[in-house]
Image (spheres, grey):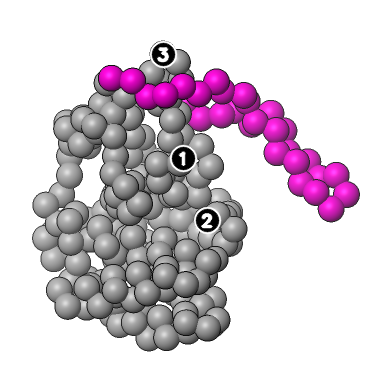
């Protein structure tokens, strides 16, 4: 799987310039979904380059136009992941939602955080995986030879299911993605229950950036999660 190489990043007055490798993208052809599934599974299964079993990243970064916090968890395993997801993801965004139509979401997010352990009662212990972090359909493509390309990440060491949930938020992965992904990385039985939990993070971000219907969508997901 390809990502554009970084050729340079520098400041010019008030501007920051990021120079990336030019990749000639093409329409995905037959077999692309299987290649994307296998490659993403391999990324998720690989030992992350840093973190030593913790969740987070070496620096804060961005989810679209929103700052994304990435302070390393103090422990790994399920408890480390739950603390990281609560503090660095849900709470970090909920604390910024103070505009018209979004402030009320904070109470719902707090109640979801209280219920987080229940979404892992299938026994799954998230393992640290290097994830893209914003893997909707606009952030994957193909080269002419069918090689998958991903770009515009919000990278972190997190639960791999967060990438899968984002792929299903505004559409669906390409044909044959799922069998190829499962063959390499597997898929826990409880993923379907956790999918809206991970999608909530992105809906909160869209509510923060765009308001309107995204706040309503986030509230509906909160209600659905609390009803489980």
Going by the picture, which residue comes out furthest to the right?
13
- Few, some or many residues within 10 Å of mark 1 (<14, 14–19, 20+): some
Of the image marks 3 and 2, the number of the one nearer the N terminus? 2
At 41% from the left edge and 61% from the top edge, which residue is drawn? 202
Magenta residues, start to end: 2-30
Of the image marks 1 and 3, the number of the one nearer the N terminus? 1
- Few, some or many residues within 10 Å of mark 3 (<14, 14–19, 20+): few
At 33% from the left edge and 39% from the top edge, which residue is drawn? 44
Alpha-carbon distance for marks 1 and 3?
A: 18 Å
Tell me the number on the disc at residue 198: none
Q: Is residue 146 left or right of residue 25?
A: left
User: Total marks drawn?
Assistant: 3
- Can you identify the residue that label 3 sits on? 145
Residue 5 located within the stretch drawn in magenta: yes
Above or below for 162 versus 225 = above
Alpha-carbon distance for marks 1 and 2?
A: 12 Å
Alpha-carbon distance for marks 3 and 2?
A: 30 Å
Looking at the rendered structure, the secondary structure element under dot 3 is loop
Above or below for 34 versus 168 = above
- Can you identify the residue that label 2 sits on? 63
Residue 53 in picture, x, y percent from top left? 37, 50
Circles 1, 2 touching at the beta carbon (< 8 Å): no
Q: Nearer the viewer, mark 1 or mark 2?
A: 1
Quadrant of the image for the C terminus? bottom left
- Can you identify the residue that label 1 sits on? 139
Q: Is residue 91 left or right of residue 152?
A: left
Give whichever of 189, 31 is nearer the camera: 31
Quarter of image, res 190: bottom left
């Amino acid at each position: 799987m390809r990502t554009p190489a970084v050729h340079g990043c520098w400041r010019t007055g008030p501007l920051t310039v990021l120079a990336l490798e030019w990749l000639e993208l093409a329409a995905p052809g037959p077999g692309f979904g299987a290649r994307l599934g296998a490659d993403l599974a391999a990324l998720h299964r690989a030992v992350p380059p840093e973190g030593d079993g913790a969740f987070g990243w070496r620096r804060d970064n961005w989810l679209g136009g929103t700052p994304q916090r990435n302070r390393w968890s103090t422990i790994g395993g399920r408890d480390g992941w739950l603390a990281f997801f609560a503090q660095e993801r849900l709470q970090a965004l909920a604390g910024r939602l103070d505009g018209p139509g979004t402030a009320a979401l904070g109470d719902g997010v707090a109640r979801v955080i209280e219920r987080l352990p229940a979404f892992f009662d299938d026994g799954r212990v998230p393992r640290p995986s290097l994830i893209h972090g914003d893997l909707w359909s606009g952030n994957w493509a193909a080269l002419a030879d069918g090689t998958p390309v991903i770009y515009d990440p919000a990278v972190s060491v997190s639960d791999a299911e967060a990438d899968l949930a984002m792929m299903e938020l505004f559409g669906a992965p390409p044909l044959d993605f799922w069998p190829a992904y499962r063959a390499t990385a597997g898929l826990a039985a409880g993923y379907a229950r956790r999918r809206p939990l991970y999608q909530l993070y992105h809906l909160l971000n869209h509510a923060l950036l765009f308001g309107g219907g995204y706040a309503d969508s986030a509230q509906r997901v909160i209600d659905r999660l609390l009803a489980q």
